[in-house]
Amino acid sequence: MAGQQALNILPSEQQEFGRYHLLCRFATGGMANVYLARLTGTQGFEKLVAIKRIHEHLTEDDAFLQMFVDEARLSARISHPNVVQVIELGQVGTTHYIAMEYVEGESLAALMRRARPPIPVAVRIIANAASGLHAAHTLRDASDEPLNVVHRDVSPQNILVSYDGAVKVADFGVARARSNVHTTSLGQVKGKFAYMAPEQIAMDDVDARTDIFALGIVAWEMITGHRLFKAPNDAATVAKVREMEILPPSILAPQCPPPLADIVMTCLQREPDLRFNSIQEMEDALEGVLLDMETTVQQRHVAAMMRSAFADRIDAKRQLMVQCQQTREVIIAPSGVGTDPSASMAGPTMTQGQAELAALRSRRWTFFVSLGAVAVAALVLGGVLVYVGTDPGTPEETPVKLEPNRDIVPQAPAVAAPKQIKILVRVSPAQSTITVDGKQVANPFELERAPSERELKVNIDAPGHVAQQLNVPLSQSGRWEISLVPTPVEPRPGRHHKKKGHRHKLDDDLFGDPYGK
């Protein structure tokens, strides 16, 4: 959906949904909404999940319902760390929903808008996404027959990267599989034109190589920082996919190693037979690039980059979770704290003593959240479709904007918007050049001003290092601590293998620690 949507806690009368408590809405699309929800059980058991709930007006559309069911059934079969897990398919009243793993993080599209990942990190993200897609492509039924799964919608919007560095493929809503009951009607093209293979646009037969082409587009765009086929309208985009000369990514990104450019260009062959035979073959080739670069990129290095790029959003989401806990403690009054029987469904009226007790609990919860910040990855707070940040042409994504809650406890004073926000950008090495909206500034760069909806375009560069680009929002305070990555050394000719037992370690602080630890 174009335009911004605030991420507010839902009114109490909208929270109850079967055995789930809906906390807030993350995304709105043409077919469904996605919510952050809490599943509770006995003995204080709680789990955060994502609920994908179809719109009411589609509940009587048999074709759509069958496609929704197919998505749930197919996704539930795939068990792989690089694929978003489906927990259950259910129904509350006439409304169908899918409960999914909640991944606290961002879509790859949101990451690419904020920062240009260093080449080693980009290779790791694409390789992990390829691993998840391979699990889908090789899925078999109970009789050990291949299901011939094709995702058909591989794009930056459907690849999630958590703040702890996990990469997960999401949204098999338009996937094709032999087991599907719903079939695509003649003349229907499903997916995003800018990430489609030529055979998919032509409505010819598709197979796993179709997803290879799409992932090749994603890789090309990550490496270059530019869109490949996107045009002002669908017709122009389709024409580009069919006819445009595709330049090697190394033309626009000289730091791209030639072997990596060759892999991307193999993926982008318009003739499927000229691409990799399987996406696992593509993954193996990417791992070979990292080997030749003498670089080991692990999940913690991706996490360090994510924490650096999204420090402000991580803080905003933590505030939201604190707000959710405060709301819960007011609505679900603990023993010894009474509520006014005449209170509305929007929330009970608090006496001064009750307000003091709620404030005390809020401070205590904030303390526990701070202690748990380092272990946030273990909470797997990031669920399925954490679609944050919106590509103007992508209706599935909605940016997250934290705003004060005025629905749950209307009697409580509203939280005033900050009169001033503070921005800090600090880059190492110290001699790095920081340019903000085309003007060179000091390092560190500090700014204090009134909040607004615009963003600062920040470019960072240093001799012998990979340049980075950031989009810094001015809606709230934020702090960015960034360490530029040294420019990769070209592999020496003829050196393709390491000696057995010899490891090349990537320093833990290569991408910087956003918390300054």
Image (tube, grey):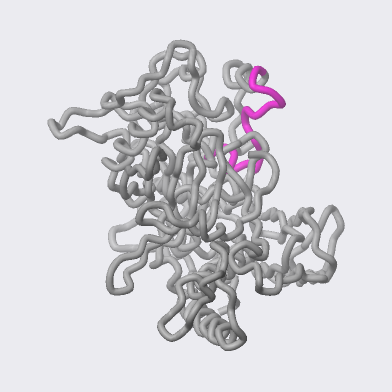
User: Is 480 colored magenta in this rendering?
Assistant: no
Quarter containing the C terminus:
bottom right
| Residue at 26 percent of width and 26 percent of height | 179
Q: Is residue 517 above or below residue 487?
A: below
x and y, in percent, of residue 28 in the image: 56, 42
| Residue at 75 percent of width and 70 percent of height | 416
x and y, in percent, of residue 69 in the image: 34, 34
| Residue at 84 percent of width and 66 percent of height | 450
Q: Is residue 361 above or below residue 428?
A: below
Q: Is residue 505 visible?
A: yes
Position of 273 with respect to 229 (left or right) is left
Q: Is residue 296 visible?
A: no
Quarter containing the N terminus:
top right
Q: Which residues are magenta?
A: 219-235
Q: Is residue 159 above or below residue 184?
A: below
x and y, in percent, of residue 143 in the image: 13, 31
**Looking at the image, which is closer to me, 143 or 452?**
452
User: Is 226 colored magenta in this rendering?
Assistant: yes
